[in-house]
Structures are given as C-alpha cells and as structure tokens.
Amino acid sequence: MLIRADGAALRVDAPAKLNLFLEVLGSRVDGFHELETLMVTISLHDTLRFTEEPEPAIRLRCHGGVGVDVSVPAGDDNLVVKAAKLLQDRTGTRRGVTIDLWKRIPMSAGLAGGSTDAAAALLALDRLWELDLASEELLSLAAELGSDVAFFVRGFPAAICRGRGEKIAAVERPLELAVVVARPASGLSTAEVFGHCQVSARPRSAQPLVEALVNGRIASARSLFHNALQKTATTLNQEVADLITRIDRHPVLATAMTGSGSACFGLCPTARSARAVARTLRAGGVPWARALRTGV
Ligand code: C5P
C-alpha cells in the first residue's frame, strides 16, 4: 500500500480484494474456520488521509464515494478507529489523529473494505506517529483486528492465505486479469454466512488455479474457480444466485462469489469486454457493477 505525503498529512489508497478461490477446511474451537483462499487485490480503492492532532483523540470523518452509500459507522465500531486505538493501547503513544475516509468499496460485499481501511490505518499511523513497529508486530495487530487485515498489511498483489486467512504466502508471478465485479442491492454478514456453512468433505486446493492463471491457461481455468461459501450465501440471499445467473449470461470465462458475498465477479477475456458486461449489468438494474483489474 503506497503511503504518500499530503502536506503534513499522509494519504493512502487502500485496495479491495477478490477471493478467486476459497475452501473451508475445518471449523475451529475459537469459532473461526480454517481456510485456503487465493486472494488478489483489485483496482478499486478507498482513500484515507491521516492528519496528526495535538490531543490523543481519534476522529474519523466519512465522505461519500461514487455509487456507495456512506452510512459507514464513524464511531468506535469502525475498524479504522479500532486499529488506531489498538496502536495507542499497545505502544502507549499520546499522539492523536483525524482520519478522513473516502469510501468507494461497497460494504458487506466480501470485498474487504473495512479490513483494507484498517490495514491502511496501521501502516500510516505507524509512520505518522513514528512508532517504527517491526512488520511481525504489525501483522500480529492486523490479525487481532480481522482475518483479512494481514493480507493488506503484507501488501502482496496475490497470495494464498491459510489459517483464519492470516497466514500468507505470496504468489510470485503476477495475476493480472480483467474482471467485472458486481454487488446486488443487499449485502451479507460474514459471521452469518460462516455460521451456516459446511466444512468441505473433499477439500480442494487453490494450487491448480494458481498454476493455470500464472501460465496463462485462463480459458481452461473455469472449473478451478471455487468458493465453498457460495452455496450458503445463495441460500441466505436469493439476489446472489440471481446475480451469478446474470453475469453468466455474458461471454465470461468464469463466475464466482467473492469471500462471504454478496458481491460476485466474472472473469473476462479483455478489459474491454469487462467494461461491456459492467455497462449491461448496470443498464439491467444491477445497483453496482464495475470493470476492474486484479493483482494491482
Ligand atoms: O475475522 P473477521 O472479523 O473478518 O470475521 C468475521 C466473522 O466471520 C467471524 O466472527 C467468524 O464468525 C467468521 N469467520 C470464520 N472463519 C474465518 C474468518 C471469519 O468463521 N476464517
């Protein structure tokens, strides 16, 4: 995540992610599930600006983004505020901050908007407050905040994530793909989807998909895309099933849900075809659809 100086403040573009593959390997005694997932960043960002304050207070101001309703919680429930408080608690710093957040990533969508914002806060405040934490410390704080936060702190454009999602192995070769990403009107709660999901009886591995994609065998990768949460999500939310059917009507190479939904994506042969699919979906009443690139 690139942190830029903006006068005395710091500015960060925090990317969303897609899960191109997600397997549920087991349920754990801590209430979480053991996963294997292929995560890629996408060319859709929230923007955050961090301005130091003389008092130790933490203030968050949420601003609208294009096509996103901004009923983002601006109080202590926001993961950005939790990240800043966690840093204050663990380091004892008395420095404060005002955080401006321009929201573009749809919420409750499986795109990890809250998690990427929290990662941006950890990285930017480490610099703004001159904490100089080791990367292992930042990764451990990230895992406390949420299962997806460490992926963004690591900053790999593509990685296979295991454990709760916090054990990260980079995919060494670029995974730059054209995708259309769309979200239906309603979202899904991650906890609810995981709460109803089934552990896979015959777990699949992400490796064949990674190999097909890095070797450019994209057209034959269709059957390798997999999301073990998709069946549960479509049962809980009919809009997800409808959206997948609608994306599949187009000449896409593969279609799947991302994370715990409700957003879904279609892999497209070119950026131009992704733009055409996004336009048609929007014209057909899908509330949010964008042509994006992965691995950036
Ligand atoms: O870690 P995060 O806050 O994103 O998780 C939200 C909820 O999703 C958890 O409370 C848990 O119910 C579920 N979850 C899970 N297994 C994971 C990640 C999340 O069961 N690996």
Image (tube, helix red, strand yellow):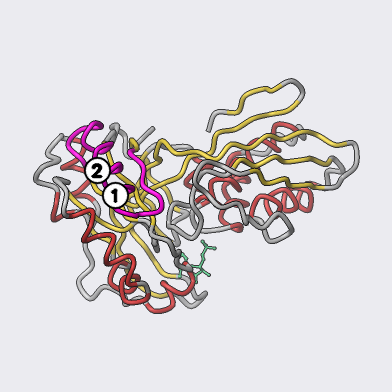
Q: Residue at x 18, y 42 (%)?
A: 211
**Element class at badge 2:** helix
Determine the image quadrant of residue 295: top left
* Residue 244 in the image, given as x and y percentages of width and height: 25, 60
10 Å neighbourhood of mark 2: few (<14), some, or many (≥20)? many
Residue beneath label 2, please? 277
* Residue 58 in the image, given as x and y percentages of width and height: 80, 47
Three-letter code for the amino acid on which mark 2 is drawn: Val
243 or 136: nearer the eye?
A: 243
- Magenta residue span: 268-291
176 or 274: nearer the eye?
A: 274
**Is the shortest distance between ligand 1 and the CB of mark 2 under 8 Å?**
no
Quadrant for the C terminus, please: top left
In the shown orientation, is residue 169 left or right of residue 83? left
Residue beneath label 1, please? 281
Determine the image quadrant of residue 257: bottom left
Q: Are marks 2 and 1 in contact (CB under 8 Å)?
A: yes
**Is the shortest distance between ligand 1 and the CB of mark 1 under 8 Å?**
no
Three-letter code for the amino acid on which mark 1 is drawn: Leu
Residue 171 is inside the magenta segment: no
